[in-house]
Amino acid sequence: MPTYEYKCEACGHTFEKFQTMTAPHLRKCPECGRSKVKRLIGTGAGLIFKGSGFYITDYRGDSYQKDAKADQPAAADTAKAKEAKTAENHKPAETPKASDPKPVAPVEKKPAKSKDKS
């Protein structure tokens, strides 16, 4: 339910009223009692997003966004980290030592052929 702003044209009193959208406009001033009240066009309330698709960080202020960018590593540091990961992933395979046991390949069993002749 929205909050509406009203102003009495007779005495100048301004006030707010919490009403449903379908409620009739107020006509009588609570201060002077005259029927000279007009509803004002207000700025409205802030927009509120509800649900799983919106995050509080989506609409943060400029200072927050600047601080977040400052916290991120510099582009040069990021490039060095990527190079290190790439080099680490492309290391040559180590040769097995003589004392290491060699892996045994699994032996596949084949079904025996039947000698039935029909």
Image (cartoon, grey):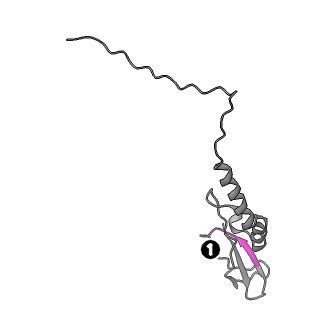
Compared to residue 25, the image places residue 94 above or below, namely: above
Give residue 29's quadrant in the image.
Answer: bottom right
Quadrant in which the N terminus is drawn: bottom right
Between 4 and 94, the one lying in front of the other is 94
Q: Percent position (x, y) of residue 37?
A: 70, 83
Between 98 and 102, the one lying in front of the other is 98
Point 68% across, 82% down: residue = 40
Badge 1 amino acid? Pro
Q: Secondary structure at mark 1?
A: loop
Quadrant in which the C terminus is drawn: top left
Point 62% across, 27% down: residue = 102
Mark 1 surroundings: few (<14), some (14-19) or many (≥20) residues within 10 A? few
Q: Residue furthest left?
A: 118
Between 33 and 11, the one lying in front of the other is 11
Q: Magenta segment: does it hold 7?
A: no
Pointer 1 residue = 24
First to last magenta residue range: 15-21
What number of labels is visible?
Answer: 1
Q: Percent position (x, y) of residue 42?
A: 69, 79
